[in-house]
Amino acid sequence: MNFLFPAKAPKVPAATTLVINDEPVEITVKVSPRAKSYRLTVPHHGNPVLTLPRTGRWPEAEGFLNRHRGWLAARLKRSAPRTAFADGEVLPLRGVPHRIHATGRLRGRVEVSEIDGELSLLVPGEAAHIPRRLTEWLKAEAQRDLAERSDIHAATLGVEVKSVAMRSQATRWGSCSSSGRLNYNWRLILAPPFVLDYVAAHEVAHLVHMNHSPNFWKAVERALPDMTKGKAWLKAHGKVLMGYGLE
């Protein structure tokens, strides 16, 4: 006697590859219990993400992905270039271009100097260690600047900041919890100081209003009257900034 069993549905992979303009593009695949439909997103950095609802089927997801091939190609074309931290590369520190130099010294810390009339960042160790050492130093610089500006804005608005931490969010510049804990994207140290100041005022204002209501924006402006300058800069250049420090 022959028994016929229904074929098992193809397993949803953790990633898939789509060829776009003759180049393979790796796409991260996620299943979300909150998703109600198939969704394709392109973060500021990292691979594109294909999200499936919990009841989604992989053949349907593949069809959705292929139908959006043109859309994905256009979005990737507009994506910011990645700028790795490597010997000879140039990065903005507080908005001012600095060239990275590997010193080769085994010990020491990152130093700001000038070489042949050009502002430079001297990074100790071999070239292979530049990304880690420079990122750690930039995080420390960002921590200092953001903690200082957060405390200043908190005093203006009459609230208390419990802690300030650096993160590497893919799409956010900062976040705030109702308990007074602030998280910031360390890449803000690459932007001009007035941009970092705007994000600090924005997050501290959330300790007054945990929303984006008109009253919230009034609080931001009370903390930083010239807030529109930083907000506009971030909207225009934020995507490029997110590309720094990526391989």
Image (cartoon, rainbow, N blue to C red):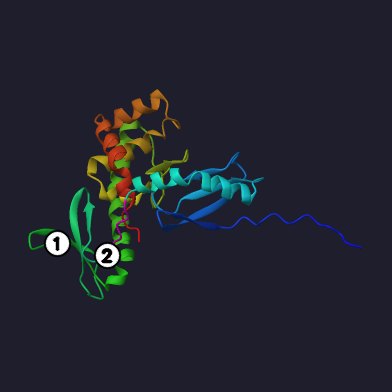
Q: Which residue is mark 2?
A: 86
Report x, y in % for residue 37: 59, 40
Asked if the magenta segment contains residue 192, the reply would be no
Residue at the location (62% across, 47% down)? Answer: 60
Residue at the location (46% across, 50% down)? Answer: 48
Report x, y in % for residue 182: 40, 44
Q: CA distance from mark 1 to mark 2?
A: 17 Å
In the image shown, does 11 or 120 lie closer to the viewer? 11
Image quarter where the C terminus lies is bottom left
Q: Which residue is mark 1?
A: 113
Label 2 Cα crowd, 10 Å radius (few <14 / some 14-19 / many 20+): many
The prevailing secondary structure element of the residues shown in magenta is loop
**What's under tag 1, amino acid-wise?**
Ser
Report x, y in % for residue 44: 39, 48
**What's under tag 2, amino acid-wise?**
Ala
Which segment is the magenta one? 81-86
Query: Which is in the foreground here, disc 1 or disc 2?
Result: 2
